[in-house]
Image (cartoon, helix red, strand yellow):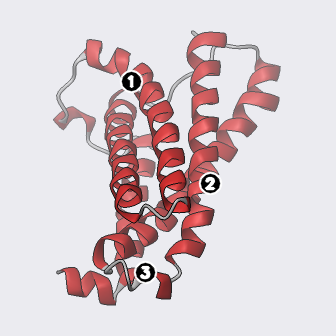
Amino acid sequence: MKKFVHDHIILVSALLSIVSLSLVFGAAGGYLPAEYLPRSDSVLKVIPHVNAFLSILAIITILKGVSYIRNKDIERHNKTMLLAFTIFATFLILYLYRVAIVGPAEFGGPENIYLFIYLPFLAIHILLAVICVPLLFYVLTIGLTYAPGEIPGTSHRRVGKVAYKLWLIAFIMGSMVYLMAYHVYPL
């Protein structure tokens, strides 16, 4: 399996991206069968706050992983970026669970703030997150299947530089969306 992934990085990254984004848009669009998911109102209520914590943790972890690679500490970089991806996956699973059952978060603020600030901010956040998914799968599959000596011969570094910046911005913007929806203008 590792050899197949190694030899088909773009294909595997594309397939993983399609599956992941299909789940996200399926949940957000109400197409996932929520009736088959266990429902816990207390868990559903705390997920946005847990995900806000995970976002901050991911931001810190990504920045730490970048600092490790800048200092040529490849082993720590690998472990830290894998941890960042695990945090992201946990965030995404919790998000999908909540959105499949409850739907997207509602905004309780004035309509002009919603239309001209919140909605554009949310749209940019979503767009960046969608763009990040294939980039993250691409660098992750290279990182997991190539030997450290092979990686400089790939586009891992070039794509990784773009991916981590967009990923950070998406997490930061997501944190701002959370603050607006749950603290500044809660329902």
Label 2 residue SS: helix
Which label's residue is closer to the chain start, 2 or 3?
3
3 vs 1, front mark: 3
- For image coordinates 69% across by 46% down, the residue present is 124
Of the two numbered discs 3 and 1 on the same chain, state the one appearing first in sequence.
1
Residue in the foreground of this view, choosing between 39 and 48: 48
Q: What crowding class fits label 3: few (fewer than 14 Cα within 10 Å), some (14-19), or many (20 or more)?
A: some
Q: Is residue 21 above or below residue 99?
A: below
In the foreground, 145 or 99: 145
Please say whether residue 185 is visible from this viewpoint.
no
**Residue corresponding to mark 3:** 151
Q: Which mark lies nearer to you, 2 or 3?
A: 3
Residue 155 pos. (x, y %)? 53, 81
Tell me the residue that label 1 is attached to: 50
Specify the label residue 166 is tagged with: 2
Nearest the viewer among 29 and 40 is 40
Binning the other alpha carbons within 10 Å of mark 1 as few (below 14), some (14 to 19) or many (20 upward) gives some
Res 15 quadrant in image: bottom left
- The reply to whether residue 38 is in sight is yes
Q: Residues within 10 Å of mark 2 (few under 14, many from 20)?
A: some
The vertical placement of 125 against 143, above or below, is above
